[in-house]
Amino acid sequence: MPLKFKQESKNVYLDAASDVNIDTSFKYRLILSPHLYWVKKVSLPLKHVRDVKKLAHTLFEESIPEDVHYSYYVYKKGEDFFVFAYDDKKILALIQEKKIPPQVIASIHFAQSELDSLEDVYHVNETEVLKVKDGVVVLLPSAWFESSEELDVESLKLSNKSIKLQQFNQFVESKVLYKVIAVLSALVLIFGAEAWFYMQERAKISDARAKVFSEYGLQPTMMQNRSILQHYETIDKQQRALRENIVQLLQASLRKAQKIQSISYTNGKLKAVISNVNKGEEKRILAPFFKKKTPYEVSFNNGNLEVEIAL
Amino acid sequence: MNKVNPLHIITLLFVLVLFLFFQVQRTQAELTHERTLFLQSKELAQKTAAYKKLYSEKNKKSLKHILMPSFVKKANLQVKQNKNIFVISSPSISLSALNSFLSRIFNAAYRIQKLEIQKIDERTASLYLEIVW
């Protein structure tokens, strides 16, 4: 079976009083009955359709109900502008009522834009006929005419003047929604750029850290490196303390008869023996250690003061 | 009829904004953490390098300079050297020579493992000193 790349499209006239037969294997171009929109043919001193569209709501101010939210569409034909007002919800409701699945709808057109070249009167339902009057497609009671022809929309080649229905409930105006989208998009860009910047910075710092590791020959883990540093810090602390405490001992206030007999340092302990010291004199001799809050132990042995300092 | 509902776009963008917001928070925290790690690593590396340099084997040269043969002979010192240890001893060294020698040792960054000074009389003392690397 060959692949079907493009579904065939058919034209359908959509009117509340007409029946519609839908085959979901086809796509449908809907032609809206004049019942489903308001149209005004106006001549304005404006050049562009977009300028007229801005004024569209004012053109219908007193002729359409105020409590309904209308969408507007404008096209130019010759010197005239055709301005449309339509209720999306009303059209969507009819589409739903006629059981037309949204996915089979190829496009939606106004009868005005597609049928304005009709010359005769055309029967569209039991009570109404379609006629073009002063360039505007209108519905008139069929009773006014003795005869009418059947409207054949199948053979029509439709223009590109189509509308897109707003399928959502309009709690807020489209402009507000677009502003929200713009703000959110800006936030996406800002946050995206910020996240990208942080990731780049992080990658740079990570590279710099790796460089520090290789440059200083560090171990792979910080735990190992901290352990090595701690080892050196302990050595340095002990060596400084050893030198400071020996200097303190040598500068101790001794009487003439009092002499330092020995100084020894091993396994982190500094010991000194001072001769001819009476009990009670040790406080004076070791005052600098007491002042610096250096912990020490003293003992007396045959008139000798033995001092032990743990470094 | 196939027009995309702006509310769907808003929902999608909102979810994206939320995701990116938390992504920014996460990457910012990671960046701060990485920066802290970098500074810690650098400080640790510099400190370790400084200590390694301070207690490095280069000090052996300066120790050998202190222990010049003339000084060793004059101070009556005995020097034994293994791979990573220097043992300097003297059964009897004058206090002035001892003072001069210890001043030089204490003013340099030698790692003293063991030290014993025993006064013999008013002018002499014995010395035992171990320096390691």
Image: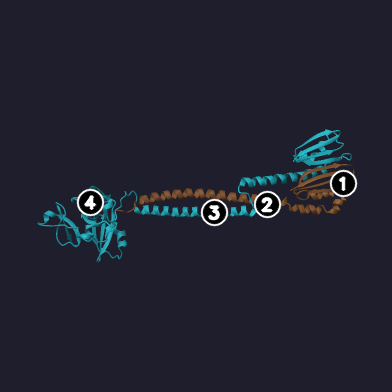
Q: Are marks 2 and 1 in contact (CB under 8 Å)?
A: no
**SS of the residue under disc 3:** helix
Image quarter where the C terminus of chain A lies is top right
Which residue is pictured at 87% across the width and 46% down the height? B95
Q: Which residue is mark 4?
A: A23
Distance (Cα) linking label 2 and label 1: 37 Å
Which residue is pictured at 75% across the width and 45% down the height? A239
Q: Which chain is cyan?
A: A
Residue B18's x, y, as percent?
Answer: 44, 48
First in sequence, mark 2 or 1: give its number: 2
Q: Which residue is mark 2?
A: B49
Residue A55's x, y, as percent?
Answer: 30, 59
- Numbered badge on residue B95: 1
Other-residue count near label 1 (Cα within 10 Å), few / some / many at <14 / 14–19 / ≥20: some
Q: Is residue B109 left or right of residue A57?
A: right
The amino acid beneath tag 3 is Ala
The answer for which chain carries disc 2 is: B
Q: Nearer the viewer, residue B84 or B100?
A: B84
Q: Which residue is mark 3?
A: A203
Distance (Cα) linking label 3 and label 2: 25 Å
Q: Which chain is brown?
A: B
The amino acid beneath tag 4 is Asp
Distance (Cα) linking label 4 and label 1: 120 Å
What is the quadrant of residue A238 in the picture?
top right
The answer for which chain carries disc 1 is: B
The answer for which chain carries disc 4 is: A
**SS of the residue under disc 2:** helix
The amino acid beneath tag 2 is Ala
Residue A83's x, y, as percent?
Answer: 26, 59
